[in-house]
Amino acid sequence: MNEEHRIQNKIRSETPGCILFRANAGDFWQGTPVYSKEYKQTVLINLRRIEGLPEGFSDLFGVRLNDGKAVFIEVKAPNGKASQAQRNFLQKMRAYGAVAGICRSVVDAINLLSKERK
């Protein structure tokens, strides 16, 4: 598990007052499942690529319990930098009224949630 995933898990499990979920972004494949005698297992045919969440979607998302506001947290390791797409996504979510920001620790997440409450 890399540093960023470790921080994500800590924020998800140790940040009070909200429910957070980890977003698994990226592309995946869908198709028709059929049994393959050659591989002796079910495989997919007629594959098509499916795009998951939009570019820049935050690592963690959820809801703040006291007021029902949506929460989006982009988690970064101590020296990590957010991409332009991630910064744009956070800015757009804040414009919609959500709590959104970049956090590098549980303390950062708690501060984000309490700062946005005022």
Image: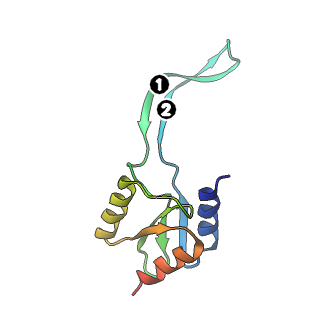
Amino acid tagged 1: Leu
Q: Is residue 29 above or below residue 91?
A: above
| Residue at horizontal 59 percent and vertical 62 percent from the top | 8
Labels in figure, total: 2
Viewer-proximal residue among 111 and 69:
111
Q: Is residue 71 visible to us here?
A: no
Tell me: 54 left or right of 104.
left
Q: Position of residue 90 (x, y in %)?
A: 37, 63
Q: Where is mark 1, residue-wise?
A: 47
| Residue at horizontal 38 percent and vertical 48 percent from the top | 55
Q: Quadrant of residue 9?
A: bottom right
Q: Where is mark 2, residue-wise?
A: 29
Indicate which disc, 1 or 2, sits on the residue closer to the N terminus: 2
Q: Which mark is residue 86?
A: none
Q: Are marks 1 and 2 in contact (CB under 8 Å)?
A: yes
Amino acid tagged 2: Trp
